[in-house]
């Protein structure tokens, strides 16, 4: 069974209106940015790391969240791991 996905305004939605792909995409993007931060920042001050997280990582997880609104517990847990 082939899953049909549509991307509109940067949000992936499947034909059955589930947002699992969007959750996976957001988590992958946020984890990539976290990896870049870990590899490049050597001074691990809590205030700096928190500002970097809020500025560079959270927008990927929160982008258009009201539109794709994760409903399933597994999707919410996936996002909260970031």
Image (cartoon, rainbow, N blue to C red):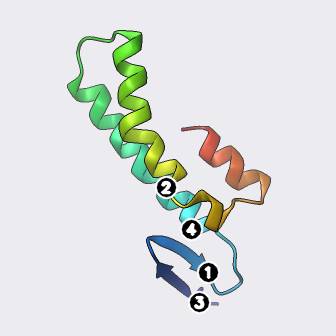
Q: What element carries label 3?
A: loop
Q: Gap between marks 2 and 4, in whole Å?
A: 9 Å
Image quarter in which the N terminus is found: bottom right
Along the horizontal axis of the image, is 72 left or right of 13? Answer: right
- Quarter occupied by residue 72: bottom right
Q: Is mark 1 on a helix, strand or loop?
A: strand
Kindly report which numbered mark, 3 or 2, lies closer to the viewer in this rendering. Answer: 2
First reached walking from the N terminus: tag 1 or tag 3? 3
Q: Give residue 21's mark.
A: 4
Q: Give residue 46's mark.
A: none
First reached walking from the N terminus: tag 4 or tag 3? 3
Q: Is mark 4 on a helix, strand or loop?
A: helix
Residue 37 vertical placement versus 22 (above, below): above
- Residue 5 x/y as whole percent: 54, 83
User: Residue, x 62% and y 81% (percent of image)?
Assistant: 14
Q: Name the residue under label 2.
A: 26
First reached walking from the N terminus: tag 2 or tag 4? 4
Kindly report which numbered mark, 4 or 3, lies closer to the viewer in this rendering. Answer: 4
User: Residue, x 59% and y 89% (percent of image)?
Assistant: 2
Q: Mark 3 points at which residue?
A: 2
Q: Mark 1 points at which residue?
A: 14
Residue 15 vertical placement versus 29 (above, below): below
Kindly report which numbered mark, 1 or 3, lies closer to the viewer in this rendering. Answer: 1
- Quarter occupied by residue 51: top left
- Residue 77 x/y as whole percent: 69, 44
Q: Gap between marks 2 and 1, in whole Å?
A: 15 Å
Q: Gap between marks 3 and 2, in whole Å?
A: 22 Å
């Amino acid at each position: 069974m082939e899953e049909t996905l549509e991307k509109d305004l940067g949000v992936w939605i499947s034909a059955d209106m589930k947002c699992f792909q969007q959750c996976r995409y957001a988590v992958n993007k946020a984890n990539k940015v976290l990896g870049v931060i870990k590899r490049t920042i050597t001074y691990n001050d809590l205030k700096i790391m928190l500002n970097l997280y809020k500025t560079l990582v959270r927008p990927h997880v929160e982008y258009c969240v009201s539109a794709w609104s994760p409903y399933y517990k597994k999707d919410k847990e996936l996002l909260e791991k970031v």
